[in-house]
Amino acid sequence: MPARTTPAEEFVPDQTPRERAGDPFDAIVVGAGLIGLTCAWRAAVAGLRVCVLDRQRPGAGASGVAAGMLAPVGELDFGQERPLALNLEAARLFPGFVADLERASGVDVGYRACGALHVALDRDEVEELRRRHELHQRLGLASEWLTPSRCRELEPGLSTACAGGVLAAEDASVDPRRLIAALRTALARAGAELIGEAEVDGALIEEGRLAGVRVAGGQQLRARWTVLAAGAWSAAEWLPSEARPDIRPVKGQILRLRSGDGGPLPCSRIVVGERVYLVPREDGELVVGATVEERGFDVAVTAGGVHELLREAYRTLPDVAELELVEASAGLRPATHDNLPLIGPGTLDGLLLASGHFRNGVLLAPLTAERIVAAMGEPAARAAAPIAGGVGG
């Protein structure tokens, strides 16, 4: 979890959901990360009564740790072609989603259509990067091979060992912590309830349908729909075993660096090496990530993880050595067996799944919300359609 205070952690939650007697919620969203908050906001904009519950504080899980890359091209690797169409669709929706959210909240979410430069630093890395570039070309993706000199023209701070690169010019980034802050504000303005530190420990099953949840302490909340958006905790024991999604946690450690004198960062766009990525922010922060570790629910920051990230960052952009290390943190990505997200009706009537997004949770948040609202019924989907240029059903 993040070691420093973030905007998401400053949130003071309501203490008790205000369910009216005989008037259940239209939707209960379990999980207040980016996926859950976006689903809840779109449902609330559609005119539905929504309550969001989270076992921690909103955004305290993987969303508050994420780097915020929106990279359907750059993140594509061999064997990962199946999610590509979904990721490309999500990338097309994202600028409209940002515009809608910033209008609704008044919060700048740090969206940057900056592109991503993938670099190779030795002969073996060149061969691997060329193979990936050929994959991009076969699939018709916007991907350009660059000479070493052209790479350094774009990013003068690159190591002189740079031996070639690929520019994914349409990849982008956003600040997930600002997104969380914006979603909290927009959600409140839309009239939804957001309850932190409220762990769900039971399902209300009525006539074979999920009719709501029980919160630790005994309170029962009913809703027409329950949206499971609990990230790595989505294989929830409170659900009947046959309804639990097959999701496991995958640990990722990540660093945040900053220029101590307010000077320029070593790169102006996303820079990706074979074992590291670096995401610059306009406020002077440089995010360095991220390890991929099968460690269960362990979120310890390790010396080895920090060393690996700093070593690879320095190898790619030597000037990172002059930056201040301001945060080291770890989060848990929710992964499925085939790396495809689970979006839509579950096996239990009344249950909607919005989880398993693995490395693309930020990118897929608005698309997931669109599909979840559509699953709640056509009137809700039509009402959720935003002003021209945004997302919607």
Image (spheres, rainbow, N blue to C red):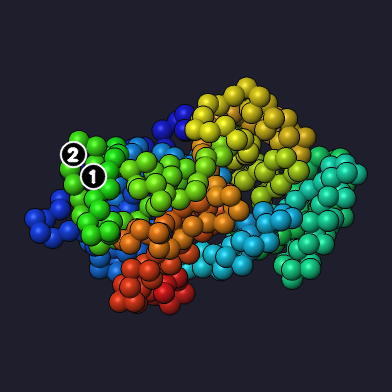
Q: Residues within 10 Å of mark 1 (few under 14, many from 20)?
A: some
Q: Is residue 108 visible?
A: no
Q: Amino acid at mark 1?
A: Arg
Task: Look at label 2 and name its amino acid.
Answer: Gly
Image position of 205 (left or right of 325) = left
Residue 279: horizontal and vertical position, in percent?
Answer: 62, 46
Residue 250 falls in which quadrant of the image?
A: top right
Image quadrant of residue 350?
bottom left
* Depth check, front residue: 9 or 109: 9
Q: Residue at x 59, y 28 (%)?
A: 325
The foreground one among 40 and 335 is 335
Estimate the x, y position of residue 95 in percent, counting from the top left.
51, 65
> Can the viewer see residue 53 in this picture?
yes
The image position of residue 334, as x and y in percent, is 51, 46
Residue hosting label 2? 218
Q: Residue at x 61, y 45 (%)?
A: 280
Image vertical order of residue 30 relative to residue 161, above or below:
below
Q: Residue furthest top?
A: 303
The residue indicated by pointer 1 is 214
Q: Residues within 10 Å of mark 2 (few under 14, many from 20)?
A: few
Which is nearer the eye, 161 or 62? 62
Is the residue under label 1 in contact with that under label 2 (CB below 8 Å)?
A: yes
